[in-house]
Image (cartoon, grey):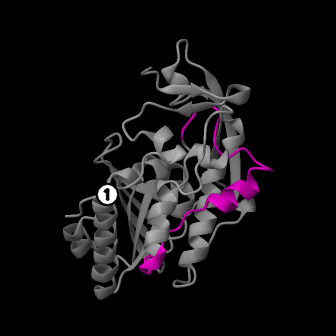
């Protein structure tokens, strides 16, 4: 079996393969959660909702769609996207147990006819995809909290040709266009960054409007492209690059809101909170 990490699709679109999460097998439905893993997910989520509710904290879980879920038309003809794949296995089980998970796949598919939301050479959504996911999540949170939500007119997008995570895996590296989102009149800024890359990274943002709710966000690398917008809707955000909830940290911070963000392919590994 080839160990090449990049699958070249139609129109030179690049996709991930042979990764530790076995994304191709997840997508084609041959790799799903075992009964034990599914029960562990449900126990973890039940505990999160119950513990946080008891503390007066609202909890929201955002699943970032795999690139393949939004752009299946650019996959090779023999690449199967199963409609009962792992993400839907988990969402359906959670729905049966009144555990809401938020998966903006439909809204992203709607907008992709007008904008490119994932670069051809990257696994991540870009700033446009991130802004759509931000609006989607903020409209859910706004049902519980009076938060401001940025509009399209508040954002400018900068387009840059670079080699990105998938393009960098090829020799020579392949470049593609990445769209960054910038808030035209920002009221928030990052006031702390421990400068770690990925796991263990911690950031804190502060907004001039201190009357807004506070949030703690447990996340993966997809959050980077929501953050410029997200920090405009909260007075303070503590961001922790981990799939696990740190209850001791939450005891210290006492936020109004906790958000988990996790890309679809990472769902294969149920987190262990501490």
Q: Residues within 10 Å of mark 1 (few under 14, many from 20)?
A: some
Residue range highlighted in magenta: 95-123
Q: Is 11 positioned to the left or the right of 143 in the image?
A: right
The answer to whether 109 is drawn above or below residue 116 in the figure is: below
246 part of magenta stretch: no
Q: Nearer the viewer, residue 175 or 270?
A: 270
x, y percent for residue 273? 24, 63
Q: Is 76 positioned to the left or the right of 63 in the image?
A: right
Hey, which quadrant is residue 197 in on the image? top left
Kindly report the secondary structure that dominates the magenta region of the rendered protein: loop
Q: Which residue is mark 1?
A: 270
Q: Residue at x 65, y 49 (%)?
A: 70
Q: Can see residue 185?
A: no
Q: Residue at x 34, y 86 (%)?
A: 56
Locate the N terminus by quadrant.
Answer: top left
x, y percent for residue 35? 32, 61
Q: Nearer the viewer, residue 14 or 76?
A: 76
Q: Residue furthest top?
A: 172
The answer to whether 208 is drawn above or below residue 84 in the figure is: below
x, y percent for residue 272? 24, 60
Q: Nearer the viewer, residue 88 or 45?
A: 88
Q: Can see residue 75?
A: yes
Q: Secondary structure at mark 1?
A: loop
Q: Nearer the viewer, residue 45 or 79?
A: 79
Hey, which quadrant is residue 58 in on the image? bottom left
Locate the C terminus by quadrant.
Answer: bottom left
Q: Residue furthest right?
A: 114
The answer to whether 33 is drawn above or below residue 102 in the figure is: above
Q: Residue at x 28, y 76 (%)?
A: 47
x, y percent for residue 200? 28, 48
């Amino acid at each position: 079996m080839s160990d090449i990490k990049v699958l070249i699709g139609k129109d030179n679109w690049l996709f991930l393969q042979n990764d530790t999460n076995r994304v191709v097998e997840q997508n084609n439905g041959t790799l799903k959660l075992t009964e034990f893993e599914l029960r562990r997910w449900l126990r973890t989520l039940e505990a999160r909702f119950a513990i946080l509710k008891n503390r007066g904290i609202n909890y929201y879980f955002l699943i970032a769609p795999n690139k393949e879920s939004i752009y299946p038309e650019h996959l090779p003809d023999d690449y199967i996207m199963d409609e009962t794949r792992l993400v839907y296995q988990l969402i359906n089980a959670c729905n049966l147990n009144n555990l809401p998970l938020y998966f903006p796949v439909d809204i992203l598919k709607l907008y992709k006819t007008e904008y490119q939301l994932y670069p051809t050479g990257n696994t991540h959504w870009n700033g446009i995809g991130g802004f759509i996911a931000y609006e989607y999540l903020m409209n859910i949170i706004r049902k519980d909290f009076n938060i401001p939500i940025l509009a399209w007119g508040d954002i400018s997008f900068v387009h840059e040709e670079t080699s990105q995570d998938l393009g960098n895996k090829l020799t020579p590296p392949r470049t593609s266009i990445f769209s960054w989102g910038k808030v035209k009149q920002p009221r928030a800024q990052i006031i702390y960054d421990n400068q770690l890359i990925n796991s263990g990274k911690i950031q804190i943002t502060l907004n001039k409007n201190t009357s807004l709710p506070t949030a703690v966000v447990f996340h993966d690398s997809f959050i980077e492209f929501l953050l410029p917008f997200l920090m405009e809707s909260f007075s303070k955000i503590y961001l922790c690059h981990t799939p696990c909830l740190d209850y001791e940290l939450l005891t210290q911070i006492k936020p109004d809101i906790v958000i988990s963000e996790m890309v679809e392919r990472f769902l294969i590994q149920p987190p262990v909170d501490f």
